[in-house]
Image (cartoon, rainbow, N blue to C red):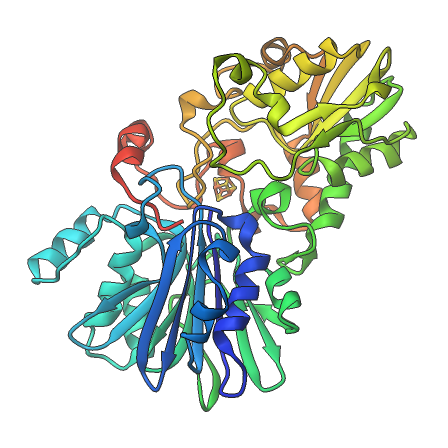
Amino acid sequence: MCGVFGVHSVEREVARLAYFGLFALQHRGQESAGIAVSEGGRVTAVRDMGLVPQVFDEEKLAALPGEVAIGHTRYSTTGGARWSNAQPLVFHGAARTVALAHNGNLVDLGVLRDELLADGVRLDTSSDTEVIAALIAHDPSPLPDAVASAMRRVSGAYSVVAIAEGALVAFRDPLGIRPLSLGRIGDDWVVASETCALDLVGADVVRDVGPGEVLWIDGDGCHAAQAVPRGRSASCIFEHVYFARPDSLLDGTGVHAARVRMGERLAEEAPVEADLVMPIPDSGTPAAIGFAKRSGIPYEEGLIKNRYVGRTFIEPDQALRRQGIKLKFNPLAEIEGRRLAIVDDSIVRGNTMRALVEMLVGSGAAEVHVRISSPPVVSPCFYGIDMADEDELAAAHRSVEEMREHVGATSLHYLSLEGMQWATGLPEDAVCRACFTRSYPTAVPAERVAKHRFEAAALVRGG
Ligand code: SF4
């Protein structure tokens, strides 16, 4: 999962807008951040490991003047936390220079890479982002045609912002798997992974970039073309469940409201006798609000989260590691002797939930009933979310009762697939739900599923 942002403006400080846009998209990637700008057609990029405010300061932003800026926040559990994987990537081709930032994951790139290498194109990384940039940078056709041609040659999930020939370019795969929205500030145009980034820079939300659509924004305004015929949409339902920020709009729907509805529906499907409804902060909070509302059980925050635990805290020693969950959460005394209904959005590997239940029982909770506002996650994602391999997914080979035993809860219930779908307000054929159903919206060869573990180690993801 990554965040992308792009802005075209002659009047405004585009690098500063990109900085704030990325700041709003920090939840989509905390490993590295970068901004590329174009001034009079000359492209400059700054990218580094770390959070957005760690990578950029006043001095660096001041050194990035231009009329176009794109930015990227990267999250990756594979491909390593390396500077060379940070984006935007700048590619100098035979036809043009392209700066490009990508959210998603291309599938079956092997043949395409071989073709490019056979054509004498130099590829410095194993990144799928570089393949898209190379295709556009070497294509002598006019820019929109070069982008459309690249889109026809790749498959998988991609929401991309790019700079080429002084224009801001944005495009999205034909299924629209990862989000991408278009906004406007006065006469200027902004593109972002999520509408919360448009809000922060003062842009009005215009619409989503359509599946298979390419936009190119230059001094003459915003131009759009349907580059690849759109099939069925398959926007990622997990964005609604967990990834997206609650204050974003996805597919025209408010994320927070959808999560509250998931909790309400869960309370109808899996009622419980409990004294308190407690969220696992922050991911479970909206669904816990919905659960409490519908069940009539009082809502209380019983777990305090340390919000400053990032991915790179100092490794604790053995003794501390055993109670590692306390780095993140600490229970309040009020839970003692109470029957708790704890609500979270999903269980992926199950380790955190098991540790949490153990901690709550150890802190005196009389009963711990776990309610999950999505169905069991049973299959890996091939579209840019490195949630886990199948053999690491706790529910992939366990029944719900086995999962209850695994996490040590008094009871455990998941929201049904129908309930989750209903809460998004979207039709079934408009979303991808493959990690819950094993039914992928694109061809994913069986051997690729089997080889996922191997490939995950070898492939550098776009983010
Ligand atoms: S497999 Fe799951 S996480 Fe991946 S795109 Fe589909 S719904 Fe989203």
Q: Residue at position x 64%, y 60% from top?
A: 196
* Image location of residue 11, percent across then percent down: 53, 87
Residue 214 is at least partly visible in this image: no
* Image location of residue 299, percent across then percent down: 86, 31
| Vertical relation: 318 (above or below) 77 | above
Q: Residue at position x 31%, y 27% from top?
A: 450
46 relative position to 261: left or right: left
214 relative position to 450: left or right: right
331 relative position to 315: left or right: right
Residue 257 is at least partly visible in this image: yes
Corner quadrant of residue 266: top right
| Vertical relation: 226 (above or below) 119 | below
Counting labels gives 0
| Vertical relation: 12 (above or below) 63 | below
Q: Residue at position x 25%, y 74% from top?
A: 97
Name, please, the residue furthest toward the front.
59
Corner quadrant of residue 358: top right
Question: Which residue is nearer to you in this view: 347 or 110?
Answer: 347
| Vertical relation: 463 (above or below) 24 | above
* Image location of residue 408, percent across then percent down: 65, 10
* Image location of residue 336, percent across then percent down: 84, 13
360 relative position to 212: left or right: right
Name, please, the residue furthest toward the bottom.
220
Corner quadrant of residue 136: bottom left
Q: Residue at position x 17%, y 53% from top?
A: 113
